[in-house]
Amino acid sequence: MNTILSRDSQVRIMETTVANAEKYFGLFCTLMAAYTRKTAKLRDKSDLLVKQILDYANTENPELRNTMKRFAEELAKVQDYRQAEVERLEMKVVEPLKRYGVQLKQMRTEIKRFNSVRNNEIKQLEKLERLRQKSPSDRHTLSQAESNVHKASVDASRTTQQLEETIDEFQKQKLTDIQKIFLDFVTVEMVFHAKALEVYSSAFQILTDYDLERDMEDFRAKLHSASGNYDARPVSSTNPSSSLPWSSSSQSIHSTPQRQEESEYDAEEHRLQDFSDPEEAPTRRPRHSRTNQPRS
Amino acid sequence: MNTILSRDSQVRIMETTVANAEKYFGLFCTLMAAYTRKTAKLRDKSDLLVKQILDYANTENPELRNTMKRFAEELAKVQDYRQAEVERLEMKVVEPLKRYGVQLKQMRTEIKRFNSVRNNEIKQLEKLERLRQKSPSDRHTLSQAESNVHKASVDASRTTQQLEETIDEFQKQKLTDIQKIFLDFVTVEMVFHAKALEVYSSAFQILTDYDLERDMEDFRAKLHSASGNYDARPVSSTNPSSSLPWSSSSQSIHSTPQRQEESEYDAEEHRLQDFSDPEEAPTRRPRHSRTNQPRS
């Protein structure tokens, strides 16, 4: 019975190993998928921001308009890299973790098969014990039962060794995979952060280059050309109110930033949808087809 | 009347400038607040991941346990930087945009005041016109009305100039602010991405340094020490099932990664709450007090 007891603790180790893998790889999969979805939502908000900056640019004078458009372009680039991040996380982190479920099911089947063989060995041993007490002189039946015990024992030993090999292979694969999956996660993140840093550096330069004084000169010229009260800088148009870049913009917006800020999530989503004209996509560059939220 | 018409188009420019500022600064405020909230949610998911990696580490052999703990520490550092990012975005981007609402309200009051002065000028002009048609010979009344028109006209001119100065100041401040706010946004993002890149580089090294073979030797030794069937590496403990690091872990988890992955958001949140023991915070280092979602 000592062999059976030690097999018992061995099978407990195996079962615990598989149970832990199921628990934690499952949790990692759920959390990595959630992390990827939150990243996709951050990208979505940023896309809306890009669109509004471009819209805003069109209401301003050439100097700020140009700066805002170039800034929005850079911000859109960061979102392209974020989109690549989302796709890579999905492919290199979430999917491999998901595939793990299949391997874990196979391991469970192996352990179940081992348990049934082991239970047979115990059953044969118990049968032999009962026979020895009931009919200690029935040599023939006892010999038969001893033979059955021996056979079951050999089966159990062979299966134990097979299971040990399987669990060894499983553990090795698990350790390799966990290292690879987290390394891939870190690599995907590093690439994104490096690219984002590069693009934001360029965005910083664009904003720094903005010439406020030149912008103010334009503004004053247009204002004075409209009033006719002052010596204005020469302005080509004689009908300023229709030639001004912002004159066609809506004038009936009376909500203040405070009110918009305090609005609840749904209201905010609703507001922003009003501006989501597909004809005015934030960036014109061809993009990888984006899923709204990677859930596959 | 020509002066009044040109004042009219001037006031339209001013109103449009303020209306555009209200619209777009309001939208930027809403979107930046949403961006900050999504970033905070990404941090929250990552915190949960850190916690689960630490829990998982405790179910593994020393080699992987050590690697996972050090990896989780790095991942927690990224979240600390993300938290700093959230706080800085709130302080340097969302708040200044919010404060803009107050300035815009003041501008609206100025324009309203200007309009009432301008309307008085028109009213006096119309009164004079009516008098000229009704009683063209009433010199005294006409002279009085002419005097009122002159007074109203002087008032309007003075107010126009005041408004022009105010709008000039407002526009200058607006352009300065928009440049500063977006520069601050870019700077906050750059700092975060640079720090994240640095920490992930260190995390990459930690994962690369992991010695899989050594881990497997430990695993085999423990498995064989439990079975007693093979020449195992010397293991100090004689009661492997209780000395194994994972022996105290829960064994009743039967959910597969697939099932967890397919679960809806609510279910997922519910699952993960089961593990959120406040005694086992992801990182032990003192943190800035974190708000769950910056909404202030």
Image: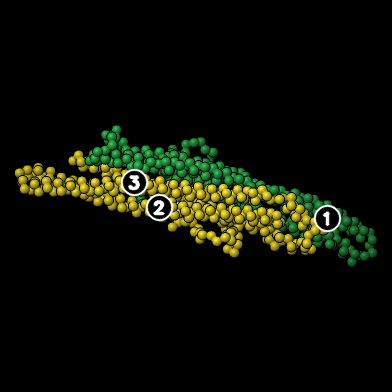
Chain colours: A yellow, B green
Between marks 1 and 2 in the image, the one whose residue lies nearer the viewer:
2
Location of residue A47 in the rendering, given as x and y in whole percent from the top left corner: 57, 56
Q: Is residue B179 above or below residue B229?
A: below
Is A219 situated left or right of B130 in this image?
left
Q: Chain of mark 2?
A: A
How far apart marks 3 and 2 lie (CA) works out to 16 Å
Task: Determine the chain carrying the residue at label 1.
Answer: A
Residue A203: horizontal and vertical position, in percent?
Answer: 62, 50
Please, what is the three-letter code of the amino acid marked with disc 3? Lys
Of labels 1 and 2, earlier in sequence is 2
Question: Cβ–Cβ below 8 Å for labels 3 and 1?
Answer: no
Can you identify the residue that label 2 sits on?
A: A96
Helix, strand or loop status at disc 2 = helix
Rounded to the nearest angstrom, the CA distance separating label 1 from label 2 is 71 Å
Can you give x and y, in whole percent of width and height, for residue B123 in the image? Answer: 83, 60
Q: Label 2 sits on what residue type?
A: Pro
- Are discs 3 and 1 both within one chain? yes
Residue carrying label 3 = A172
Can residue B217 be seen by looking at this rendering?
yes
Q: Is residue B239 left or right of residue A266?
A: left
Quarter of the image that includes the C terminus of chain A: bottom left
Tell me the amino acid under the disc marked 1.
Answer: Tyr
Q: Which residue is mark 1?
A: A230
Extreme residue toward the bottom, this view: B133
Give the farthest residue toward the top: B236
Residues marked 1 and 2, same chain: yes
Q: Residue at x 47, y 53 (%)?
A: A88
Tell me which residue sits at (60%, 48%) in the image: A201
For this rendering, which residue is in front, B142 or B251?
B251
Please state the horizontal and vertical placement of residue A59, each as a whole percent of the image. 68, 58
